[in-house]
Amino acid sequence: MSIAKLIISIVARLFPGAIFYQPTGEKIIALTIDDAPTPNDPEGKSTDRIFAAIAAHNREKASPATPVKATFFLITGHLQPNSTLIERLIAQGHEIANHGTQ
C-alpha cells in the first residue's frame, strides 16, 4: 500500500462521513485555488485575475449548462476588513472552503 493510500485510510477511519473519492460515469476535474486571497494584495487583483480567467473560459469554451466553478480555500487572516471577496465568490457560484487564519 502506498503512503498516500495509507494516510487516506487512517483519516477515513477518523472521519467516516468524509468523501475522498467518488467514482463517476463521466470525466471531471476539481479546480481548487489555495490560500486566497494572496497576502500583500489588499486590492485582490490576483484573485480578480482568477475570476476573469474562469469567466473567459465559461464564455468561450464551457457549456452554459455546465460552467466551470472553483473551490477557493481561504485564509481568513488574509481578508481585508471591507473585502467583498466572499460576496463575489458566492455571486459567481464558487465554493468556499477554509484553510484557517493567519
Image (cartoon, helix red, strand yellow):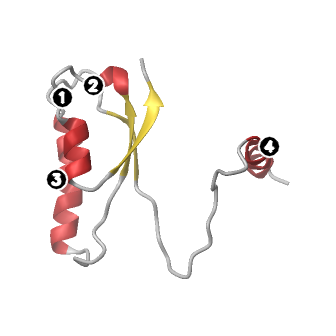
SS for callout 4: helix
Farthest-out residue, front: 17
Q: Nearer the viewer, mark 4 or mark 3?
A: 4
Q: Are marks 2 and 4 in contact (CB under 8 Å)?
A: no
Q: CA distance from mark 3 to mark 2?
A: 19 Å
Q: Which residue is mark 4?
A: 10
Q: CA distance from mark 2 to mark 1?
A: 6 Å
Earlier in the chain: of badge 4 and badge 3, it is 4
Tally of marks = 4
Local packing at callout 4 (Cα closer than 10 Å; few below 14, some 14-19, many 20+) is few
**Residue 25 sits in quarter:** bottom right
Residue depicted at 47% across the width and 71% down the height: 28
Mark 3 packing: few (<14 Cα in 10 Å), some, or many (20+)? Answer: few
Residue 50 visible: no
Report the amino acid beneath label 2.
Answer: Leu
Residue drawn 18% across and 33% down? 44
Circle 1: is it few (<14), some (14-19), or many (20+) Cα within 10 Å? some
Looking at the image, do the residues carrying marks 2 and 1 touch, with CB atoms under 8 Å apart?
Answer: yes
Which residue corresponds to mark 1?
Answer: 83
Work out whether mark 2 precedes mark 4 in sequence or the reverse, and give the earlier one. Answer: 4
Q: Quadrant of the N terminus?
A: bottom right
Residue receiving disc 2: 79
Mark 1 or mark 3: name the one nearer the start of the chain: 3
Q: CA distance from mark 2 to mark 4?
A: 33 Å
**Relative to residue 27, is residue 6 drawn left or right?**
right
Horizontal side of 50 relative to 9 (left or right) equals: left
The residue singled out by tag 3 in the image is 52
Q: Amino acid at mark 3?
A: Ala
